[in-house]
Amino acid sequence: MTPKPYHLGPLLAITLLAACSSVPPAATSASADSAVKPAPAAAAGEAATARSANPPARLSIYFPFDGQVVAERYQQELAAHADYLMHAPRQRATIEGNADERGSREYNLALGQKRAEAVRRALSLRGVADRQIEAISYGEERPQAACHEERCWELNRRADLQVDAAARP
């Protein structure tokens, strides 16, 4: 079966946008040494069981000024969250979009929602069911840092992904 060109458009756009995104703050990045290494083939069954029992830690995805594209550097962590959610279909995840204090309240709420939706789309493209993901925006209302300069603003431009503590029926 030949793929229809209209099926490739959104995937191509997301890939191109991700490749063009700028690097998030260095202070919040994980080092290459802490990267997750693939499990040996013999331990694959054990790894699948561990994924189902232990949700991944909360993940903050940082964005450049006015940005709303998930950077490549977060793909491995998003894959771990997606893998967990696909193996635990009763679990839910919440994505909270945030913005820095610059811009109007309405603009920042909309930008926070776009950031949360970008993370939701990244999980959906990895196979997570839409019913498992809730994307909300807090705009500038929940800052990580309170100062009024770039070093704080870059910490506030984020989307926080959290797997809910208890599965819902």
Image (cartoon, helix red, strand yellow):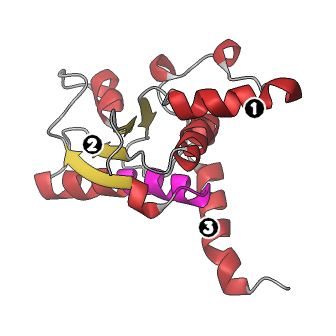
Classify 10 Å Cα crowding around label 3: few (below 14), some (14-19), many (20 and above).
few
Q: Is residue 141 above or below residue 32?
A: below
Classify 10 Å Cα crowding around label 2: few (below 14), some (14-19), many (20 and above).
many
Q: Is residue 125 magenta?
A: yes
Which x, y percent locates residue 105? 12, 52
Q: Dividing the image into 4 quarters, which one contains the N terminus? A: bottom right
Q: Amino acid at mark 3?
A: Ala
Which x, y percent locates residue 156? 29, 32
Task: Using the rendered view, name the quadrant where residue 114 is placed.
Answer: bottom left
State if disc 2 and disc 3 touch (CB < 8 Å): no
Q: Which residue is mark 3?
A: 13
Q: Amino acid at mark 2?
A: Ala
Which x, y percent locates residue 144? 25, 25
Task: Using the rendered view, name the quadrant where residue 166 is placed.
Answer: top left
Secondary structure under tag 1 reads: helix
Q: Is residue 25 above or below residue 108?
A: above
Q: Is residue 40 visible?
A: no
1 or 3: tag closer to the N-terminus: 3
Q: Which residue is mark 2?
A: 99
Question: Residue at position x 30%, y 44% from top?
Answer: 96
Q: Is residue 60 magenta?
A: no
Q: Which residue is mark 1?
A: 45
- Count of marks, rendered view: 3
Q: Amino acid at mark 1?
A: Gly
Spatial CA span between label 1 and label 3 = 35 Å
Q: Is residue 27 visible?
A: yes
